[in-house]
Amino acid sequence: LHGFAQRAGVIQALDHGPLGDSGGDIAAFSSVQGGLGVEHFKGPALVGEIAVGALLGPHCLGVVTEKYAEGLALLGDMGLLLLVFEGGLTMDIEMLKSVGAKAFLVAFSGTLLPVLMGWGLMSALGFHAIEAFASGTALSATAIGFALRLLQDLDLVKTPQGQLITAAAMIDDVLSLLVLAVLKAVHEEPSAWHFVRPVLASLVVFGLGLLLRTVAASKMEDVHAQKALLELPSWQPFCMMVFLALTMSFAANLFYSTTLLGTFMAGLICGAIPVAKVTWDSSSLPDHIIPWAVRLFFAASVGFSIPVYALFHGPAIKFGLVLTVAAFAGKFASGVFGMMPPDPWLSAIQVGCAMIGRGELGFMMASESLESGLLGDTAFSATVWALTLATIGGPILFQKAVKLSHDPKATTYGVYAVTEARL
């Protein structure tokens, strides 16, 4: 992937940092070692990958500079798109219908509560109302990449609870667009259309995806159609899937929705075609390409985006620790809408912990608020503390919450079980 990016001109070879052309290679290798190190101590690998990315990135040691970081982050974003596509491909449509309402409530409450709690806490600490609101909005977005990676690592994607968390994280991503529009409205005062547009576009993408899946499923009822697809060379269905994913992600972004929703719906459509799942599973993507690209996502797209310098600005630490309460509690409380049998409260804890993890969007919103004057230096640093602790602490809490349902022979999560060896 790294060599391909250089040949394609993605990575600028003019400015690689103090270690020259090897800086990106060191970052990629170190992120893997960081993940393995955390796994050795029974923690989630992505925490180590993020920590290494933050340490080696342009905002700390500068082993990887800004231009080079953009190329690696782009490759990481490609990995995220592949992970989201696979999430849609493995989504059980009947199960999605049964958990859809719960997923919406989890996402909606998990978006609203951190904003309100962050606003209230920062106001109580003496910050201006607009500054407090900007801090709260930066805490609103759950990173779907975190949820999918954790579910995959524990082999939970295809379970009812895994489907609920995946759907909630996807809806949360759409709601984040609305929160971003609100934040821009505070600064730029756009028209009401700027609020309606992302929601309307996302509903169209979602509706179109469901319609195309229904059409695909009806076509697959024809035995001759299935036989014709099975007789195709494996590269042809694969290219069709890639084309559909690229088309829908591009169209969703073009019409002010999110590329992740377009990619997810493309996977959902392909999930109705049996040969598509077989082709995907038999390719090198699930076992070789995606794991490496996703590691780059957490190290580069997330880790590089953490402004480490801001963590040590004046009294930011004490304010940041207080704001962290809102970052954790707001998302954790949303789990109450994700109760599932046979142990509703345990499932609520697990869903709430799964939603805590943040990503690069929160840091981007905080940085934009700083540049536009909505956040001062101290409030910005406090927000970075809260986002960083949630980014690292969320995956750890989810893993611990999953192990609360431990059984001597198997680890049971809600209505399903995963072998102890898998953990």
Image (cartoon, helix red, strand yellow):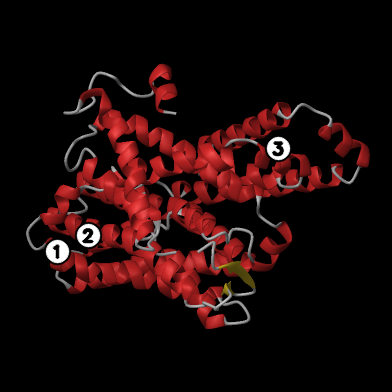
Q: Are marks 2 and 1 in contact (CB under 8 Å)?
A: yes
Looking at the image, is mark 2 or mark 3 earlier in the sequence? 3
Disc 2 to disc 1, C-alpha distance = 7 Å
The answer to whether residue 147 of the structure is visible from this angle is yes
Location of residue 342 in the rendering, given as x and y in whole percent from the top left corner: 62, 81
Crowd tier of the residue under label 3, counting other residues whose Cα lies within 10 Å: few below 14, some 14–19, many 20 or above: some
The image quarter containing residue 293 is top left
Residue that label 2 marks? 385
The residue type indicated by label 2 comes to Trp
The local secondary structure at tag 2 comes to: helix
The residue type indicated by label 1 comes to Ile
The residue type indicated by label 3 comes to Thr
The image quarter containing residue 123 is bottom left
Crowd tier of the residue under label 2, counting other residues whose Cα lies within 10 Å: few below 14, some 14–19, many 20 or above: many
* View extreme (left): residue: 314
Residue that label 1 marks? 317
Looking at the image, is mark 3 or mark 1 earlier in the sequence? 3
Looking at the image, is mark 2 or mark 1 earlier in the sequence? 1
In the foreground, 15 or 380: 15
Q: Which mark is residue 279?
A: 3
* Residue at 77% across, 44% down: 274
The local secondary structure at tag 3 comes to: helix
Location of residue 303 in the rendering, given as x and y in whole percent from the top left corner: 30, 46
Crowd tier of the residue under label 1, counting other residues whose Cα lies within 10 Å: few below 14, some 14–19, many 20 or above: many
The local secondary structure at tag 1 comes to: helix
* Residue at 48% across, 36% down: 78
Q: Are marks 2 and 3 in contact (CB under 8 Å)?
A: no
In the foreground, 250 or 29: 29
Residue 3 shown left or right of residue 245 in the figure = left
